[in-house]
Image: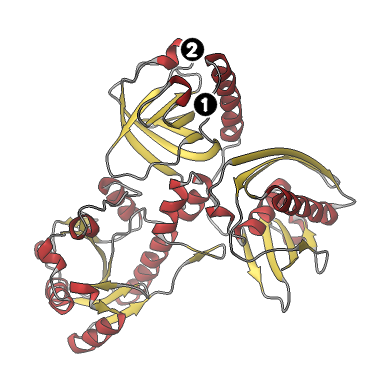
Amino acid sequence: MQVYESIDTASLSGPTFLTIGTFDGVHRGHRALIAAMRQAARQVGATTGLLTFHPHPRTVVRPGQPVAMLSSLSDRLELYRQTGLDFVILHPFTINTAHTPASAFIHRLHSHLQLSQLWVGPDFALGKDREGDVAHLQAYGQQQGFKLHIVPEFYWEEQNIRTSRIRRLIEIGNVRWAADWLGRFYTLSGIVVYGDRRGSTIGVPTANLSPAGGRVIPANGVYATWAWLGSKRYPAVTNVGLRPTVQGTHRTIEAHIIDFDDNIYGRCLRLEFVQRLRDEMKFPSLDALVAQIERDRQQGLDILQSDPQVPEHPRFYEIPYTADWGVRVNGNSLDQLFQHAALAMFSMQGAAEADGPTVQHSLQLSGEDLEDLLVRWLSELLWRSETENVMWQNFALHEVSEHSLRATISGREGHRDMAHIKAVTYHDLYVKSPQETRDHWEAQILFDT
């Protein structure tokens, strides 16, 4: 992939297919747009590229309102490269850029890149006062001989995926669902710096991470994380926050790398945030803190030892029904099927963006058969959600058989003003085994809304 430092340094013979935007995080929607553009370009032998601005336009236009980014510039360039683009233009964004009329900017692009097609989303706009909206660009493209291709909004598991929504999920600590929307675990990298070394005195050594400025930091709390040192990955439990038990005065990111005690000061550490364990808490004593850290350590290890994966394909999708709302769910195992069914039910109720205090429960259920057990499972979750005012977000199925299950569930207090499910029904319900589908477990569930 060729990287150009400005439009003026690129001189292509065309034809060229181009998309323009920040593409922060390079989430599933971004990658879907680029993949569609590349596929269309291959059919006519065109070159594909992306133009992005550096620094972020808002830092220039509104210097008092900095933007926290999902990815550093170097991370973005690597993610762009992985999409298979032929080139990227890192165009400098200045006050002059902000005041450039849309037609002048596109003319500059057309002359340097021999632009054939411009691929954008439905709400795209550029140029002074955002005058270069879709209608303007379509008309200008007809005059200049390039086509504007408008890509519909991207949905993943019935959710509209936008950078702003992913940023919000991370800011409230819902890193598990943020990973689903990103298509990978959210990552922070930085140098390990000296802290107050209190962790070592209580038998819990930690690595203090100093990330680059301007990044989105997960909400204060404790997380199961993967810690990367070079090419080696280690399980870790990471605390983000003020450490109120020891009268902390500033926000820190401290990773306790499990069963690891090497000196890594000054080294680059990369943390992948897998799942939130709990809120930050103040404990009455150091002994109480150490006891909780041990529980966090074990819970984090249990999660990481299961090797959680970010899904490559949707785990459920909506099916049309006249009166009720229905979903079809899949999973590689029975426990996955039950987990994904719960995700579907709460996803459509807006659980991802609930941000109250964390709640966690263990439960055991039994049923007459798999279909009955599935309905009882979802009904129990729905009942607990209503009675405890909790939107469940994470579901760990420890044991699932034809007649019983054992699980741990966690979520956040608060309801969302989205579609409300009243009950789980037996109407048109089915559970199919891999022998029946020739591939995976599958279930169909109808909800009364």
At a point 90% along the width and 51% down the height, the residue shown is: 368
The disc labelled 1 sits on which kind of residue? Lys
Point out residue 118 in the picture as x, y percentages from the top left corner: 27, 75
Identify which residue is drawn at 28% across, 64% down: 21
Left or right: where 405 falls relative to 217: right
**x then y, percent, for residue 341:** 69, 55
Q: Amino acid at mark 2?
A: Ile
Q: What number is the disc on residue 282? A: 1
The residues bearing labels 1 and 2 have C-alpha atoms spaced at a distance of 16 Å
Q: Between disc 1 and disc 2, whose residue precedes?
A: 2
* Viewer-nearest residue: 215 or 138: 215
Residue 201: quarter of image: top left
Q: Secondary structure at mark 1?
A: loop
The one of 110 and 320 positioned closer to us in this rendering: 320
What's the mark number on residue 202? 2
Q: Which residue: 78% across, 54% down?
A: 379
From this view, report whether residue 441 is shown above or below residue 176. below
